[in-house]
Image (spheres, rainbow, N blue to C red):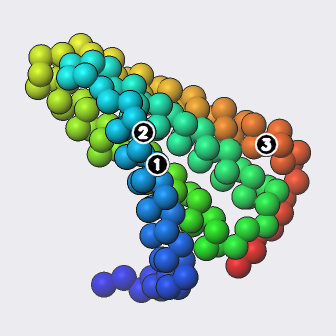
Amino acid sequence: MSNRPIPPASRVAAVAAGGAVGGTLRYAFILAFPVAPGAFPWVIFWENVIGAFALGLILILVLERWRLAWDVRSFLTVGVLGSFTTFSNYTLDVVTLASGGAVALAFAYSGASALAGLAAAALGMRLGHRVAGGRRAGVAR
């Protein structure tokens, strides 16, 4: 049994609302840009890369420049970006490609996703540092 405090209802609601926004955006992109079976899943790839960049950027800005309440932070990071990016769709794409005979493409997609996501997060963090100018904002509760 954990002794961790239960988050306030407002934070839980913020994450849920952000999840609705991010999940809806992800679904809209999937519908707008369908991927042919056996093809590189560009939509999920770019959603994850863009989300990694945005998360890196937002986290640095939140830590060094913006004074955002925890509910707003949770809405943006855990809610919107957590549901916009998707490990589950990424994994499903890898398994679908491999089980459909496109094993090399599945490995390429898996590796490219990891490398591009890490690079995007690092780039977002670097941009965040430049925008913030090294100033710390403190924590708004």
Q: Which mark is residue 25?
A: 1
Q: Please, what secondary structure does the residue beneath circle 3 have?
A: helix
Pair 1/3: label in front: 1
Task: Determine whether label 3 and label 2 are within 8 Å by CB.
Answer: no
Marks 1 & 2, CB-CB < 8 Å contact? yes
Quadrant into which the C terminus falls: bottom right
| x then y, percent, for residue 84 | 46, 49
Give the quadrant of residue 34.
top left
Mark 1 neighbour class, 10 Å CA radius: few under 14, some 14 to 19, many 20 or more: some
The residues tagged by marks 1 and 3 sit, at their Cα atoms, a distance apart of 27 Å
What residue does disc 2 label? 29
Name the foreground residue: 132 vs 36: 36
Dot 2, how many residues are within 10 Å of its Cα: few (below 14), some (14-19), or many (20+)?
some
Q: Is residue 8 above or below residue 72?
A: below
Apparent side of residue 118 relative to residue 67 in the rendered image (left or right): left
First in sequence, mark 3 or 2: give its number: 2
Query: What element does badge 1 sit on?
Result: helix
Mark 1 / mark 3, whichever is N-terminal: 1
112 relative to 35 in the view: left or right:
right
Q: Which mark is residue 129?
A: 3
How many marks the image carries: the answer is 3
Residue depicted at x 55% and y 82%: 10
Q: In the image shown, does 69 or 42 lie closer to the viewer?
A: 42
